Image (cartoon, rainbow, N blue to C red):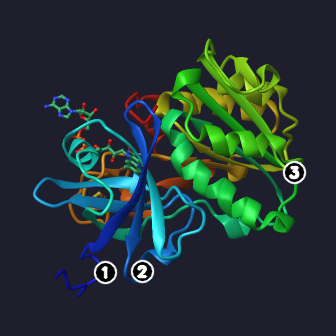
Amino acid sequence: MMQISTPFMPEKGVIRSIVPMAQDNYLFEFKTDTDRLAACKPGQFVELWVPGVGECPISVCSGRVTESIQLLVRRVGRVTNALFQMSEGDWAGLRGPYGHGFPVERYKGQNLCMVAGGLGIAPIRSLWQYVLDHRQDFGKVILIYGMRHSDEMLFREELKLLLQRGDIHVFLAADDATVCELPPFAMQVGRVTDMIRQAAIDHDFQVAICGPPVMYKYVIEELKAKHVTDQNIWLSLERQMKCGIGKCGHCFIGGRFTCQAGPVFQLADLKFVPELIECDNGGAQ
Ligand SMILES: Cc1cc2nc3c(=O)[nH]c(=O)nc-3n(C[C@H](O)[C@H](O)[C@H](O)COP(=O)(O)OP(=O)(O)OC[C@H]3O[C@@H](n4cnc5c(N)ncnc54)[C@H](O)[C@@H]3O)c2cc1C
Ligand code: FES
């Protein structure tokens, strides 16, 4: 039986459910015995450990973490492949939460736009769940979600419900939208930048963004055209991370450990390493 002796020890998370969202993208719900993960905030991450295989960082995907936590995982390599071999009732290790998430307290009382590209929807989903649970604390709320193909849409059923709500404006677009169950008016062929242009965003919006790094430069350009300031733009940067706790040095850039200083950064705070936004073409989509 695993003993939790330090904050860095993984705790046992029993897989309660596995829901396929799209090809190679599953939503895993883990039940834990302690309330350590109840402290998770939107935009933070946990380290997922598959015994005998290894660990990788995964964003907190649920806005309400109590005795269970949801993680959206894309199968790409060793750890995620091993996780995809598991079944309900099996367990993996979870440690965290780590990093700085989206500053939800700062967003309160303000208008908020959330922009997600591809797998970037995972942390953004935890943010919209948080915001909708505290809806009265926020002004106008906009969600913009872009993907390469409409078949890759994640959280399809949840998005349908959001589209029916009158208190959040949802924009969905795919580069290629040939197959889609959603009403045609809701799904567009295009990119997140096209939708930012259409959305009623102005200078007083806070904007939370997560997507492939190549997307950031163009999203920022569109937001600047709408006079959104660097102080109001928040980016989740998924750098190469391993330990998550400032020890291994994998995520060190511009004098900072992004696992601790991030993964969410204010654009105004990123001027010291412009290449973080402009040159990185790896990432999540
Ligand atoms: C803060 C943060 C949050 C994240 N959130 C999520 C999330 O919510 N969901 C999610 O699915 N992912 C998320 N990621 C990304 C995830 O951590 C990585 O995809 C992680 O590498 C997966 O681990 P793995 O062992 O399965 O893949 P790895 O084995 O590390 O492989 C990673 C990549 O390297 C490639 N690769 C592996 N081996 C080789 C090789 N021999 N030669 C060439 N290429 C190779 C793989 O094809 C893959 O693209 C997040 C990352 C960070 C930093
Ligand atoms: S991931 Fe190890 S130092 Fe940041």
The front one of 185 and 9 is: 185
Q: How far apart are the alpha carbons under marks 2 and 3?
A: 32 Å
| Front residue of this view, candidates 56 and 225 | 56
* Distance in Å between CA atoms under marks 1 and 3: 39 Å
Looking at the image, is mark 2 or mark 3 earlier in the sequence? 2
Secondary structure under tag 2 reads helix
277 on left or right of 141: left
Q: Position of residue 185 (x, y in %)?
A: 82, 22
Residue 36 badge:
2
Amino acid type for the residue under numbered disc 1: Pro
Question: Badge 3 is on which residue?
Answer: 167
Residue under the point 86% across and 67% down:
136
Q: Mark 1 points at which residue?
A: 7
Instruction: Give coordinates of residue 58: x percent, y percent.
Output: 38, 53
Give the amino acid type for the residue marked by disc 3 in the picture: Asp
Query: Disc 3 on helix, strand or loop?
Result: loop
Query: Callout 2: 10 Å neighbours few (<14), some, many (20+)?
Result: some
